Image: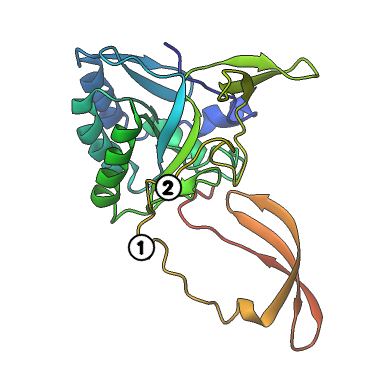
Amino acid sequence: MKIMNINLIKNIEYAELLSQPENSKLSKLILKKLKSLPDYEVKQNNFFIECISTKNIMKEQGWKIHISASNNNYIHILKEVIRIIVPLNVSFKWVSIKNRNIMLTKDFLREQAGKFITIYPQNNIQFQVLCRIFQKKLRQYSGVPILTDKSIGNVISIRYGGFKKILDYDNEGDGIYCIRDTNKKLVYDRREIGIYKPEWITENFVKPLNNLYPKQKSKLLEQYNFKNALQFTNYGGVYEAIQKKDNLHVVIKEAKSDFRRL
């Protein structure tokens, strides 16, 4: 059974350059342990390592859980997540340890950035239970924000979408990933920033943690009126603004944490 995969970075040579054998012994140890599990089929593709439960049939679509991380804590988070979900025979995929460098770069697709671990719950009850467990067990970690999802914890986010690869074609003949609506009709599985579920799906059963990201007003930013966004990358945005005190036109550059700067 093949989990959906997409072209995450266009420059293949650049991707190969970044895929250094960092912590290769630990990566091989984790992979070896997963391959020894009797109820899992483990496949390694160019970017992800897919761990598919042979005991529980995966649904076509549903609520999925994404776990984010940073360069420093990914191994700790990965081991903790595996300890939680493997006894439940939950299917999942994860970014190989050497490929985490690619996900933390400036040019990685913003719609996919931060999705280090993807978990495919068997039903809504298991989905809710896993969300609560992750909220408790992973509360102390920080990671890259996932822009296409609803955040429910510092490194935990949720999204409704396809589990399996269902392809259709748009009006121009290009292949697109799809899910089924309430009438079983194929519709585009939109993986866009700010869209984490289709309109016909209701969701009110998983609440974000209180004080998820403590917000502090920046006195520096209050000195400016922001006019336009000039550029967006994983490292942050570039904005056109006007300084309030003297109407001076300025350009402000945002710097996000947890991404790998080369």
**Residue closer to the observer: 100 or 136:** 136
Q: Nearer the viewer, residue 225 or 29?
A: 225
User: What residue lies at 62% left-to-right and 76% top-to-bottom?
Assistant: 221
Colouring style: rainbow
In the figure, is residue 129 to the left or right of 194? left
Q: Looking at the image, is mark 1 or mark 2 earlier in the sequence?
A: 2
Distance in Å between CA atoms under marks 1 and 2: 15 Å
Q: Which mark is residue 4?
A: none
Q: Read off the residue under disc 1.
A: 210
In this image, 24 relative to 255: left or right?
left
Q: Is residue 246 above or below residue 140?
A: below
The one of 166 and 70 positioned closer to us in this rendering:
166
Location of residue 210 in the rendering, given as x and y in whole percent from the top left corner? 35, 63
Q: Residue at x 56, y 21 (%)?
A: 180
Residue 183: name its quadrant. Answer: top right
Q: Where residue 145 sits in the image (x, y, percent)?
A: 48, 50
Q: Amino acid at mark 1?
A: Asn
Left or right for 109, reference 69: right
Figure check: 117 above or below 169: below
**Residue 133 image-quadrant placement:** top left
Residue 134 at x, y = what percent?
A: 28, 45
As rendered, which of 44 and 127 lies closer to the eye? 127
